[in-house]
Image: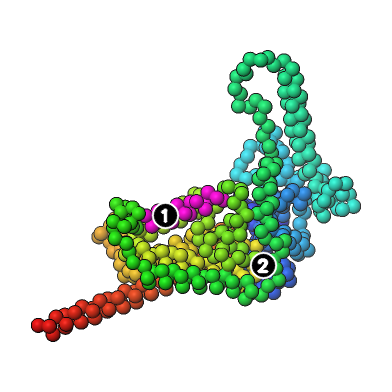
């Protein structure tokens, strides 16, 4: 395999999130340990090396002088990966970055139409070479980067100086205009005397972000696998025991005693869960809540908190890409399962399987040593109720929207549909080369496994109840015969 080393050779479908191949085979577990020092498993190491190699070629490496939102160990992983790549795969990062910068400037000046991301520079770079990152010997005073002063900083500084000059001129004009104001009312102007802060300058937002960041230590604590997992595992066991106890002793209230007697119980239960999930989603957009959300509604393998196993079941940060799909399937499958097994068993399944799925995900990342991952979302619980519903009716034929496939064609058996839904997650965790982590496949698989287990428990519980009712009925009939 011929490695891509120049910006001009970038494929048209290149994506920074996917990166480029840097060798024929992925790094082994031993190599990953030698490169990253045990903070990444082999799959995660392979992924970050592909991304970093791609960015070296594309000229999109992060500027070391710019503020970074990465956690401490993420920065360490990035630095170690770059160090290894620069020793193993030499290439001209300066040329690639300058070529990209040329095209960006040409586009800003209207000299080159934008095609896709950036079209390769077919003619090559013929101008004077600029060191993208100078050595520390040439480092100017005030630069904190170990890489030295960035050549692209001149572009940024010139633009910043221009914006500052315009802002200063506007302030002077405004101050001068005050001298000529009369006592009459001025027409409302939405742009009059309103100063827009640049991103990150809002002091209150900055305060809440810094406070939330302090939830995690600068580096993952030196803990054994057992020490990381035991508190969370204990909380999950207590949760499962609690919801099972609740389901066992729960007695449905009479219709007159219900809070909403005219609304079906399935709707009120599922709608309440959706509203609870939406409330947590809304809190993710309320900066004062960031501290508590980072503590209890986000699972972090590097520094796990036991209660996050429950909180992350209700936690979403993206509306269309995460919250909406999960809530759609919660409503679609949830009310069907609720109607079949009742409120107590439904809530026990949702919460118990959701907590189990969170713990399966945490265990997978901790055992693999992936501490640059975080997870949240109701996906594990949603996959759990889907698996429970399908496993309760393994041979039932499924037809989408009641008519697909048509009646003349056999429907899809539930067990086949279950395999179809679980298949992508199984393939993802078994793949030798992992794609960028956008889904928590281990949580999904934990939900599937927990849902199947819940279905088996429900089946046995049903059978015991049926046998108990039959026994009581037979005893009652025998008692009546004796009385006669």
Image quadrant where residue 100 sits: top right
**Nearer-the-camera pick, 187 or 185:** 185
**In what element is the residue under mark 1?**
helix
Residue under the image location 82 percent in, 51 percent down: 144
Residue placed under numbered mark 2 in the picture: 40
Relative image position of residue 287 (x, y in whole percent): 61, 48
- Label 2, secondary structure: give it: loop
Q: Give how far across and how far down residue 222 sits, in percent.
A: 71, 71
Residue at image coords 72%, 23%: 174
- Which of discs 2 and 1 lies nearer the camera? The answer is 1
**From the viewer's perspective, is 185 left or right of 384?**
right
Magenta stretch bounds: 268-284
Q: Nearer the viewer, residue 410 or 242?
A: 242
Q: How is the image coloured?
A: rainbow
Identify the disc placed on residue 272: 1
Furthest-front residue in view?
483
Specify the quadrant that holds the N terminus: bottom right
Rendering quarter of residue 397:
bottom left
Check residue 90 in the rendering and tell me which mark sits there, or answer none: none
Residue 416 seen in this snapshot: no
Which residue is found at the position 81% from the left and 52% from the top? 145
| Residue 413 to residue 118: above or below | below
Q: Is residue 211 above or below residue 240?
A: above
Res 458 visible? yes
Extreme-left residue of the structure: 484
User: Which residue is more in the foreground, 418 or 129?
Assistant: 418
Above or below residue 257? Residue 206 is: above
Circle 1 Cα neighbour tier, 10 Å, few/some/many (<14 / 14–19 / ≥20): few
Q: Position of residue 21 (x, y in %)?
A: 65, 61
The residue that appears at 20% across and 82% down in the rendered structure is 475
| Residue 340 x/y as whole percent | 31, 64
């Amino acid at each position: 395999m011929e490695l891509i080393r120049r910006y001009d050779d970038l494929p048209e479908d290149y994506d920074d999130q996917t990166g480029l191949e840097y060798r024929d085979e992925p790094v082994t577990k031993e190599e990953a340990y030698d490169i990253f020092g045990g903070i990444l498993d082999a799959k995660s190491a392979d992924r970050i090396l592909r991304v970093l190699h791609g960015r070296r070629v594309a000229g999109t490496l992060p500027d070391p002088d710019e503020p970074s939102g990465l956690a401490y160990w993420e920065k360490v992983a990035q630095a170690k990966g770059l160090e290894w790549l620069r020793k193993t795969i030499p290439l001209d990062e300066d040329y690639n970055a300058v070529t990209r910068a040329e095209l960006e400037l040409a586009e800003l000046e209207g000299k080159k139409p934008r095609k896709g991301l950036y079209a390769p520079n077919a003619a090559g770079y013929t101008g004077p070479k600029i060191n993208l990152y100078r050595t520390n010997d040439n480092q100017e005073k005030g630069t904190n980067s170990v890489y030295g002063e960035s050549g692209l900083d001149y572009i940024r500084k010139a633009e910043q100086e221009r914006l500052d000059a315009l802002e200063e001129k506007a302030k002077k004009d405004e101050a001068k205009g005050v001298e000529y104001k009369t006592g009459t009312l001025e027409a409302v102007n939405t742009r009059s005397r309103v100063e827009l802060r640049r991103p990150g300058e809002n002091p209150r937002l900055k305060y809440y972000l810094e406070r939330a960041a302090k939830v995690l230590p600068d580096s993952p604590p030196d803990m054994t696998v057992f020490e990381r997992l035991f508190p969370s595992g204990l909380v999950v066991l207590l949760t499962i025991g609690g919801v099972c106890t609740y389901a066992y002793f729960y007695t449905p209230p009479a219709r007159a005693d219900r809070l909403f007697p005219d609304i079906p119980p399935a709707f009120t239960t599922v709608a309440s869960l959706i509203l609870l999930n939406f409330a947590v989603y809304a809190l993710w957009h309320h900066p004062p809540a960031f501290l508590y959300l980072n503590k209890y509604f986000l699972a972090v393998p590097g520094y796990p908190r036991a209660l996050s196993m429950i909180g992350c079941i209700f936690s979403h940060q993206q509306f269309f890409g995460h919250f909406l799909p999960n809530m759609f399937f919660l409503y679609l499958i949830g009310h069907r399962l609720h109607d079949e097994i009742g409120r107590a068993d439904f809530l026990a399944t949702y919460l118990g399987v959701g907590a189990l799925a969170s713990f399966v995900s945490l265990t997978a990342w901790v055992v693999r040593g992936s501490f640059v991952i975080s997870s949240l979302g109701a996906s594990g619980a949603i996959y759990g109720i889907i698996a429970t519903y399908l496993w309760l009716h393994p041979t039932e034929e499924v037809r989408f929207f009641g008519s697909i496939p048509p009646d003349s064609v056999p429907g899809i058996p539930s067990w086949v549909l279950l395999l179809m839904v679980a298949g992508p997650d199984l393939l993802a965790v078994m793949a030798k080369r992992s794609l960028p982590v956008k889904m928590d496949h281990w949580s999904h698989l934990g939900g599937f496994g927990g849902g199947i287990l819940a279905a088996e428990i429900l089946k046995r519980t049903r059978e015991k109840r049926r046998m108990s009712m039959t026994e009581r009925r037979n005893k009652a009939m025998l008692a009546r015969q004796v009385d006669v």
